[in-house]
Image (cartoon, grey):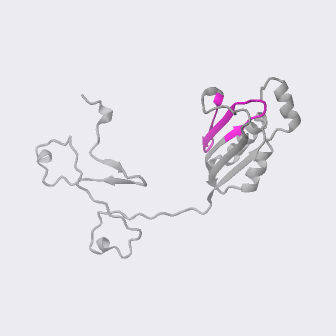
Amino acid sequence: MDPEFLKVPEEHSHHHGHHEHEHEHEHGDCKQCEAGDHDHEHHDHHHHHHSDEEGCAQCAAGDKDHAHHTHKHDDRVSSVGIECEGALDMRRLNEWLSTLLQEKGADIYRSKGILNIAGTDDKFVFHGVHMMLQFGSSAEGLGKPWQPGEKRFNRVVFIGKDLNRKELNDGFRSCMADAEEQEAVAADGGSA
């Protein structure tokens, strides 16, 4: 009694770790296929990987039923990591991240970070894909809060196209709360 969504369509893909292949299966001498039973699998396929069509013996022999895998890397894609001590001002951070993602979100493929926010012992984390960003904290059960004596830090990573390392560093560091603000937030009960 299998639900419909668990059934495997006749054409299906196999996942082999680093990339996917689509396979069409020869039914040749299959007695079940001849009898009209197509609710079974055929797993006698082969994979041939070539990095270049030139010099491929199978191509030269006219065999077009195999794959050539070529990978082109974009030199404009890079990552920028930023790590610094000190506490961040949540308002400044939100404004900066909002502006950054509005202006450059299409080129920022992934972002993530661990954050020390002024006035709280909660450890904040975020992760994003393009313009979608999700925040959470240890208060919500994501990890543990900063422990007494633990070195507090901020660590963020952006992965994307045409990233400007200096702009990202300067922008992030502009979100730091200065000592007077940190004291005021702490005195106000930690509402960042």
Image quadrant holding the C terminus, namely top right
Residue 92 located left or right of residue 45: right
Region of the chain picked out in magenta, as a range? 114-138
Residue 93 in picture, x, y percent from top left: 75, 39
Residue at (70% x, 39% y) in the render:
115
| In this picture, residue 99 sits left or right of residue 112 | right
Image height check: is 94 above or below 56? Answer: above
Is residue 134 on the magenta stretch? Answer: yes
Query: Is residue 180 left or right of 172 when viewed as pictured?
Result: right
Magenta run includes residue 162: no
- Residue in the picture at 76% in, 55% down: 166
Identify the residue at image location x=34%, y=73%: 56
The spot of residue 101 in percent (x, y) is 68, 44
Residue, far top: 189
Q: Nearer the viewer, residue 135 or 52?
A: 135
Q: Residue furthest front?
A: 149
Q: What is the x, y in percent for residue 68?
A: 38, 65
Quadrant into which the N terminus falls: top left
Q: In this rendering, would 165 be left or right of 16?
A: right
**Majority secondary structure of the magenta segment?**
strand
Quadrant in which residue 54 is drawn: bottom left
